[in-house]
Amino acid sequence: MTGDRADRGERVAPVLLGAVVLAVWQGLVWGFDVPSYLLPGPVAIVGAFLAAPGLLLRSLVSTLVVTFVALVVAAALGAAMALVMELSRLARAAIQPWAVVLQVTPIVAIAPLIVVLVGNAFASLVVCATIVAFFPVFANTAAGLASAPAELRDLFRLYGAGRAQTLLRLQLPAALPFFLAGLRISGGLALVGAVVAEFVAGSGGFASGLAYRILEAGYRLEIPRMFAALVLLAVAGVAINLVLGAFGTWVLRRRGEA
């Protein structure tokens, strides 16, 4: 009974904190009579969303499509490259430095070049978001493949298991939790990459996602609408994290049951 109350309290606490922060925010805006073009309150932000919900939601869908495609591509590439590195020391020496280069290169610096080189607007957004989301899946999967205990590897070798059998029956199951953890991190990063790429593409004339709506609202001094788009992005990021976390838990539970 006490545990149920504690769990209920942990679920309610973030909601209560958010409600308190919003109430204080709105009270300060009203109390100091802050104009909405400087800092809109939650009421003005909700009003801006309700004034044009279809426009913002369509833009959100566009951003989420780019995010989802980039996440799938990053997961496939990251897992495949980690697997290749595990199979070949030469491949590890060739791939790992360039993966680190991709991680440390600011996407905002190379996004304009990618947009110009790729040509297709949607593909360029996916490429930018994939670059940002790639490394967590790659690094976590590589760590997972290497995490199989040495004594179990020796046991497999003792019983005559080949390289493929060891990889399939020992290393891949050991790497699954690492891969799922990396996928959860990459979900948020894919959204960040998509938004950054949309800022660049939007400024170049390609209008679709929420990032362009933020730019558009800023240029027109429609600050409440800009905040409404930012809130939608934040909600989308939280939802992606929760969905991927639930997916990982479900996969691991099914694996345990199997």
Image: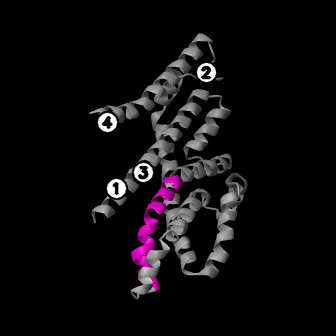
Front tag of 4 and 1: 4
Give the CA separation, mark 2 to mark 1.
44 Å
Find the residue positioned furthest to the front: 151
Whichever of callouts 2 and 1 sits on the residue coming sooner in the sequence is 2
- Asked if marks 2 and 1 touch (Cβ < 8 Å), the reply is no
Give the quadrant of residue 257: bottom left
User: Picture coordinates of residue 128 (x, y %)?
Assistant: 62, 57
Mark 3 Cα shell of 10 Å, populated few (<14), some (14-19), many (≥20): some
Mark 2 Cα shell of 10 Å, populated few (<14), some (14-19), many (≥20): some
User: Picture coordinates of residue 211 (x, y %)?
Assistant: 59, 43
Q: Amino acid at mark 1?
A: Trp
Mark 1 Cα shell of 10 Å, populated few (<14), some (14-19), many (≥20): few
Front tag of 3 and 4: 4
Q: Is residue 115 left or right of residue 248?
A: right
Q: In this figure, what is the number of numbered marks?
A: 4
Residue at the image position 34 percent from the left and 55 percent from the top: 250
- Asked if marks 2 and 4 touch (Cβ < 8 Å), the reply is no
Q: Is residue 123 visible?
A: no
> Secondary structure under badge 4?
helix
Vertical position of residue 50 compared to residue 120: above or below: above
State which region is magenta: 163-186
Q: Which mark is residue 245?
A: 3
Q: Amino acid at mark 3?
A: Gly
Identify the residue position indicated by label 4 in the image: 3
> Secondary structure under badge 3?
helix
Where the N terminus falls, by quadrant? top left
Whichever of callouts 3 and 2 sits on the residue coming sooner in the sequence is 2
Whichever of callouts 1 and 3 sits on the residue coming sooner in the sequence is 3
Vertical position of residue 246 compared to residue 159: above or below: above
